[in-house]
Amino acid sequence: MTRDYENFLSKFKKNDYIFKFFHQKIFKKRNIILRHDVDFDTDYALNIAKIEKKLKIKSTFFFLIRSKSYNILDPEEIKRINNIKSMGHEISIHFDPSIYNKKNMLEGLRQEKKLFESLFKKKIKVISFHRPNQKFVNLNTKILGLNHTYQDMFKKHITYFADSRNTFRYGNPLKSIEFKNKLSLQISLHPIWWQNKFYKNINWKIKKYIAKKNSHLKSNLKKNLNKSKLNLK
Ligand SMILES: [Zn+2]
């Protein structure tokens, strides 16, 4: 694995930043909340969790419950998420409001919360929204008694950066005036973009991901079907 991720994070440590969780007291200066929305793969999440552990950095990982990319009930996925938790990172729900309608959205969140908490023996404190519309991006209140990562205290009172779609669309935090002045930050990094060199383009990264999923699917098929009749080359 590339050292890009390690190098990126080390710069914050060198600039005297202290890594905090969402539920902790956030000061105006030198605090950083590092967040990961796990949209694609728990392996990728585990990889970056290990790098953070090596650097003695703590972050918060948010997982989709009703994803088409991974199955949170799969024992292997559960093991990986528990592994991330055991390293001292926070774990919670990456909630996708778009799969619900107005009437059942809160009930959906209640169910997802219940499932996650019982699977991982973990009380959820803060959630993050998956691909939220403007209504959720601008929501400044709790939802179902839970804080969320788009509240003003995490997005306006401190400066927010994200690596959405493989680029720092709102600027690279390391090149920002806020970083220079050691002001507090929330940074959202998606594990998929940091598995190799960060400058590699999005198509290259997505192809790698598809190849990984394909090989996993093939080995699963081999396990479940009669190998002698299979020709998957
Ligand atoms: Zn997402």
Image: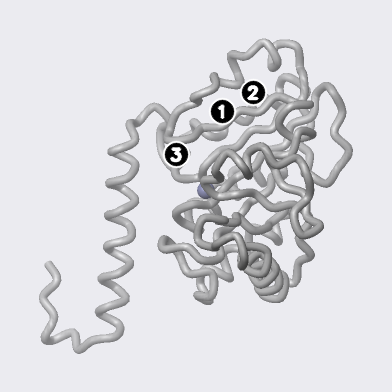
Amino acid type, label 1: Asn
| Residue wearing tag 3 | 193
Position above or below: 46 against 104 = above
Quadrant location of the N terminus? top left
**Residue sitting farthest toward the bottom:** 226
The residue tagged with tag 2: helix, strand or loop? helix
Mark identifier at residue 7: 1
For image coordinates 79% across by 31% down, the residue present is 18
The CA span between labels 3 and 2 is 18 Å
Residue pictured at 70% horizontal, 24% vertical:
159
- Judge by depth and name the residue closer to the eye, 186 or 12: 186
Quadrant of the rendered image containing residue 222 = bottom left
Badge 2 crowding class, 10 Å Cα cut-off, few under 14, some 14 to 19, many 20 or more, is few
**Residue at position x 67%, y 10% from top?**
177
Q: The disc labelled 2 sits on which kind of residue?
A: Lys
Measuring from the top left, give residue 198's x and y in whole percent. 43, 31
Secondary structure, mark 3, is helix
> Which residue: 68% across, 64% down?
106
Label 1 or label 3, whichever lies nearer to me, is: 3
The residue wearing badge 2 is 11
Badge 1: how crowded within 10 Å, few (<14), some, or many (20+)? few
Label 1, label 2: how far apart the Cα atoms are:
7 Å
